[in-house]
Image (spheres, grey):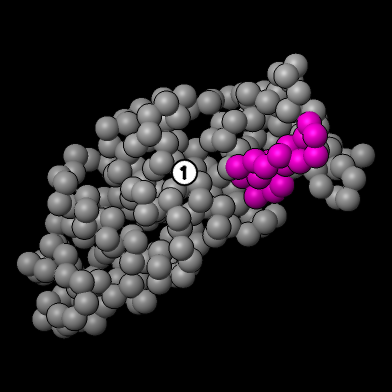
Amino acid sequence: MKKVNTVAVVLKSINYRDSDKIYTLLSKDLGKIPAIARGVRKISSRRAGNLDTLNLVKVGLSEGLGGMRQIDEVSGLNSFKKLKGDYALSIRCSYVVELLHKTTEESGNAEEAFELLVKFLKIASRFPENIDLAVRFFEIHYLGLMGYGLNTETCLRCKKELVRKGPLLYLAPDRGGFFCDDCSRSGLGFPTQTVGKLRELSQNKLTKTDEKTLKDLSTITSALIDEHFGIRIKSRELL
Ligand SMILES: [Zn+2]
């Protein structure tokens, strides 16, 4: 039987039969996969705690019956405890996981998505007070990975640098960018500094952000996610 070791984040789990669980893992080497763990619902199982949702784990997998992978061994690398004990933090993490889960294909190449999720979890654990900015960071990079990168540099029509335009720039979600106010004033308008903040996030810079800008960023990513994925992310409504 083919065995493979990889690292993964646990996205979700469902009970299966009397004592088993089927987990959805976002793994570094195999992408998003379902994997069964036998006997984890028994009180004596030491593996169960390691496989909590959001945990970063090292797993040893073998190919089980029916082609589904089986989790033979698991060791915890990071359980991101801080993110689970607080409601506001945990619903934001649930949202990120739901977005990933609903939009990542099974068994596709997901190494970059895996790395991005781990990066998000680490940033959010380290700076829980900035979790909203961390979620926006995740969304912007995730959209980019999925081929929906946002042009925050130049106007979609006149190609002039957006930093020199304003005071408002107009988002065109379907075209992945903004119009300056000489070129179009339809749709949602955002201050130039909000677009500057988006640019910083896409360059991996997370700096202090005021409430109004955070709200604008959320409106922008929400519009892009609606446009490109066209699915309802239930947990977003709780944010
Ligand atoms: Zn323009």
Q: Position of residue 138 (x, y in %)?
A: 40, 48
Q: Residue at x 85, y 42 (%)?
A: 63
Residue 14 falls inside the magenta stretch? yes
Question: Which residue is more in the foreground, 148 or 45?
Answer: 45
**Relative to residue 104, is residue 181 depicted above or below?**
below
Q: Is mark 1 within 8 Å of ligand 1?
A: no
Residue 164 falls inside the magenta stretch? no
Question: Which residue is more in the foreground, 154 or 85?
Answer: 85
Q: Which residue is mark 1?
A: 94
If the image is split into quadrants, where does the N terminus sit? top right
Q: Position of residue 148 (x, y in %)?
A: 43, 66
Mark 1 is on which residue type? Ser
Query: Is residue 223 shown left or right of residue 18?
Result: left
Q: Residue at x 54, y 25 (%)?
A: 78
Image quadrant in which you'd find residue 216: bottom left
Query: Pointer 1: residues within 10 angstroms few (<14), some, or many (20+)?
Result: some
Q: Residue at x 17, y 52 (%)?
A: 213
The residue positioned farthest toward the left in the image shown? 167
Q: Position of residue 2 (x, y in %)?
A: 88, 40
Image quadrant in which you'd find residue 55: top right
**Relative to residue 39, is residue 163 depicted above or below?**
below
SS assignment for the magenta stretch, majority? strand
The stretch in magenta equals 12-34
Question: Which residue is more in the foreground, 66 or 18?
Answer: 18
Label 1: element kind: helix
Residue 5 seen from this side: no
